[in-house]
Image (spheres, rainbow, N blue to C red):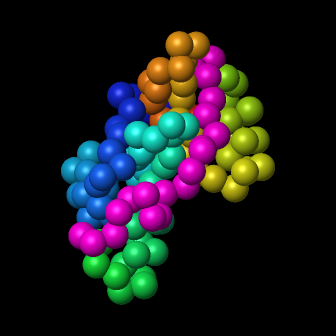
């Protein structure tokens, strides 16, 4: 998993999210909603494909609400199954205190299984 978890606030724009993802060399950010949401590089690309101004689109318009999460002690095979079943590429990792501690991606899983 990638740690620490990178987040972005609900008042950020898609441009802010894109800049943060580029700066941190990551493909997803948890949006600080309750329950948490996620914005991905695919969401950012969709805005560009629609020829919309990323500086004017709030992340809340493109984020995925109420994302699936996993505990830090989950088996890799279970993560792979969840990613496949839910057709997603990122899972925030949450500890027993409901603290977000990291993110596991399909790239992480592929690297470990190969």
How many numbered marks appear? Answer: 0
Report the side of 113 relative to 27 (left or right).
right
Up/down of 33 relative to 5, above or below? below
Q: Position of residue 47 (x, y in %)?
A: 40, 75
For the view shown, which residue lies furthest in the top direction?
97
Q: Nearer the viewer, residue 53 or 73?
A: 53
Report the side of 75 relative to 108 (left or right).
right
Q: Position of residue 88 (x, y in %)?
A: 63, 53
Quadrant (top left, top right, bottom left, bottom right) of the C terminus = top right
Question: What stretch of residues is rendered in magenta?
Answer: 55-73
Quadrant hosting residue 12? bottom left
Q: What residue is rendered at 42% in x and 84% in y?
A: 50
Q: Nearer the viewer, residue 8 or 33?
A: 33
Q: Nearer the viewer, residue 88 or 108?
A: 88
Asked if the stretch drawn in magenta spans residue 9, the answer is: no
Report the side of 13 relative to 35 (left or right).
left
Residue 9 visible at all: yes
Quadrant hosting residue 96? top right
Q: Nearer the viewer, residue 25 or 11?
A: 11
Residue 108 visible at all: no
Q: What residue is rendered at 63% in x and 29% in y?
A: 70
Q: Position of residue 40 (x, y in %)?
A: 45, 56
Q: What residue is rendered at 41% in x and 40% in y?
A: 32
Asked if the stretch drawn in magenta spans residue 58, the answer is: yes
Up/down of 15 relative to 37, above or below? below
For the view shown, which residue lies furthest in the bottom direction?
51
- Helix, strand or loop for the magenta stretch, by majority: loop
Quadrant hosting residue 56? bottom left
Q: What residue is rendered at 34% in x and 69% in y?
A: 57
Q: Position of residue 107 (x, y in %)?
A: 53, 47
């Amino acid at each position: 998993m990638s740690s620490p978890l990178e987040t972005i606030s609900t008042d950020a724009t898609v441009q802010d999210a894109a800049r943060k993802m580029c700066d941190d060399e990551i493909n997803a950010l948890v949006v600080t909603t309750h329950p948490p949401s996620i914005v991905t590089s695919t969401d950012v690309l969709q805005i560009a494909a629609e020829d919309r101004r990323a500086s004017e689109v709030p992340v809340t318009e493109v984020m995925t609400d109420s994302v699936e999460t996993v505990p830090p002690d989950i088996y890799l095979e279970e993560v792979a199954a969840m990613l496949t079943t839910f057709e997603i590429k990122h899972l925030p990792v949450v500890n027993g205190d409901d603290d977000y501690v990291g993110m596991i991606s399909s790239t992480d899983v592929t690297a470990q299984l190969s």
